[in-house]
Image (cartoon, grey):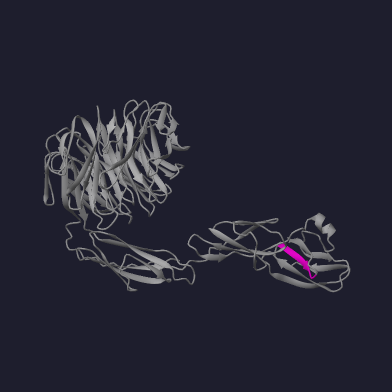
Amino acid sequence: MRTFMSFLLLVFLSNSKAQVWNWAVSAGDGSNVDQCYGIATDSQGNAYWAGSVRGTSEFGCGTITTGSNTAGVLAKYDIAGNCLWVRSVLVTFDDALAYDIAIDAEDRIYITGSYNGTAVFSDSISLGSYIGDDIFLARYDVDGTCLWARRAGSSSSDEARGIAVSPEGDVFITGFVGGSAVRFDPLQITNNNQRQLFVARYDSTGTVQWAKASTGNGQSKSARGISVANGRLFVTGQFSFTSGEFDGVPISTNSMGGKAYVLACDLDGNALWANSYGSGDHEGMGISADTLGNVFMVGRLWGSMFLPDDTLVSVSSNDDFMILKFDADGNYQWGKSTGSTQRDLSWSAAADGQGNAYVAVQFNATVDFFGTSLSSSGGEDIAILKLDGDGEVVWAKKAGAGQRDVPLCIHRQAEAPHQLYFGGYYWGTVTYGSTTIDDVANGDAMMISATDTTFDVSTYAAQVCPGACTGEAVAFTNGQGPFTYNWSVGATSSVIGDLCADFYIVEVNDANGQVHIDTVYVEEATDPGYTLQVQDDSLWIAGGESYTWFFNGTTAVGGDSASHVAELTGNYNALVTDAFGCEWSSDTVLVVLNVGLAEQRRSTLHAWPNPASHVLNVSYPGAQNTPSELINSAGQRVRSFTLRPGVNALDISTLESGLYGLRSARGEVVRVIVE
C-alpha cells in the first residue's frame, strides 16, 4: 500500500493578498471590436496576446491601421510589460479576427481565427478565401516572422475558436464549419450543409494530418475551446436543440434545449467519450485539462442543468457562471454555478497542473462565489477565481472599474514564476498595480499580468523496481518564484533521481520568504502476478511491454512477444518487463504435446479413464519397474511411482482437479485430466 506523509509549514507575508496585479497594457481606437481573445507565454517568460482591432491602434512598439475593416492582431510583451513587436492580419474587405493562440515547447507560435476576403499576413504571406468567413492557422517565430499560413473552409460560414498544442509539437484547432464540402487542403470532409463542430490536427510545418466534423441536423452546434493533456484532446461548446455525434460517439441524443458538452478524443481524432447536459440553454465556453487527469469546463448556465448527482439552476432569467469538473475518462466529479439577477458567465479557465483551476468570470451586481462575495463597481466587472480540486475557492478577486470590463481569456505561465494573465476588453479608466490604462473610446483590448502569492507545493514519486535505486521525485510549485529546493539527500533542484525505496523530505522557499516542507515516499513496485494462458500448444500473457520466454529453464528461440507456440513437451514460463522497466517472472505451466486419442493409440504408454476422478489405470507394455511421475500444470512433481507389467492402478483421489502430465523415464508423456 502506498503511504504518503505530508508536513506543511506555510508562512504568509500577507493574508489579505492572494493575488497582486503587476501591470496592464491596452490597445484600440474606439471601434467597439478591440478585444484580446487569447494569451500565451513562451519559455523565456514573454507574453503574447491575439485578438482584433479596428481603426488606428497604438501598441507602444508599433501602430496597426486597418481603416474601416477589423484586423487580427498578435502582440509580444516582455515579462515587465514592454511591447516588443506587433503583427496584423489585414483583409481587403470585411473582418479578420484572431480568436486564440498557443505556443509549443520549441517556442513555435500559432494563432487561429476567421477572415473574409484576402487575408494579408506579414512577410508577404496571404490567403484567399472561399465564400463567406473562412478559417486561418498561422505560425510565427519569436521575432514575429510569419513562417506560413493555412486556410480551411466551405461555401458557408466557418470559424476556428480554439487552439492547443501537444508536447510533441502537433497543433489542434476547433470551431464550427458549414457547407456541403469543407476543405482542409489537401483533405476534404463532407457535411450536410448544417453547422457542425470540427477538430483538425496539423504538424509544425502546416500539413494537415486529419480533420473531422460532427453529424446531425440543426444550425446550432459549436466548439469554443480545446485543451490537450496526456495524449488526449478535450473540446467544449454547445449542441443546441439538436442531436448528433462525433466519430460515432453521441454528443447529444435529443433536441431538448441547448446543451453544454465535453468531447474527448485521442490525438488521432478517435472519439473516446462525450458528456452533454441540457434542459435549458447552457454552453461550454472554455476548457482546460492537466497531466493529473483533471478536466475543467466553464461557461454559462440558464435554466436547469441536470447532472449525475446534482441539479444546477440559474438564479434568474439571465445567464449564470458555471464550472464542471471531470476526470480524463469522462467521469463527472462535481459542478457549481452562481450568479446575480443580471448576466454572469465565464469565458476561460486555466489548470495549474496541481489540481487547481483559475477562472475568469464576467459578473454584475453582487455575486456569492461559493462563500466569497464580490460586488461590481457599477457595470460589468471581472472576477478572477482560484478553485482547488474539490471546487473550493482558494481566493477570489475583483478587477475592473465603474464601466464595462469583460475577461475573454486567462492563462497561467507553465514555467516559474508562474505568472497569471487575463485579457479581454474594458471601458473607462482602470488601475492595475502601478499601471493605469484608459480606453480611447467605446472599449479597448487589454492584457493584465498578475502574481498568485499563494504558495503551494505538491510532490510526486514514481515506483522503483525491487532492489533498484533508480527512482525519481519531483516537487511541483505554485506561487512567486524563483524557488529554492533543499532535499534531505542534499539535492537542490526540483527533480532528484537515483533514489531507493524510502521517504524523502524537501524544503521549498519562494521569493516572498514563504517556506513549505513536504515528504514524498518512493515506493517499491509489487509483483503484478503475470499468469500464462494455455490452449493446446499456444501460450500467451496479458499485460507487460516486452517478453522473454523460457523452456525448461532455458531461453526459448523466438520468444520475444506476448504469445509463444510450444514446440516440445515441457515447462514454460515468461520474463515480463512492465512499462516502468521492472522485470517479473510469470507462473510456470506444463505443456504436453501429441497426447490426443490418436496419439495415445500410437504410444505404448496408456492411461484411462481420462478424465479420471479416483483411480487412474496405466499400462506400459514392456515395463520392467520403470520409474514414472505425475507433473501438475505448474511443473511440480506431485506423485512418483514405478510401472510394472500389466495394469497399474494409481490412487488419485487426493489430487486437485486440473491438468497433469504422466511421464515415464523413457520420455513418453500422456496428458491426464483429473476431475
Helix, strand or loop: magenta stretch: strand
Q: Could you tell me residue 414's position as x and y percent?
A: 29, 54
Which residue corresponds to the image point at 21% horizontal and 42% vertical from the top-left? 86
Which segment is the magenta one? 659-665
Q: Where is residue 343 in the image (x, y as percent from the top left)?
A: 23, 37
Figure quadrant of the C terminus:
bottom right
Q: Is residue 662 magenta?
A: yes
Residue 622, compared with residue 275, is above or below; it is below
Image coordinates for residue 433, horizontal then vertical, percent: 13, 52
Image: 251 above or below 7: above
* Residue 106 visible (yes or no): yes
At which x and y percent is residue 381? Answer: 18, 42
Q: Which one is nearer the viewer's eye here, 557 or 673?
A: 557
Viewer-side residue, 351 vs 180: 180
Q: Using residue 587 as the reference point, say whether residue 448 is left or right of it.
A: left
Q: Is 232 one of the magenta-colored residues? A: no
Question: Is 307 displayed left or right of 641 in the figure?
Answer: left
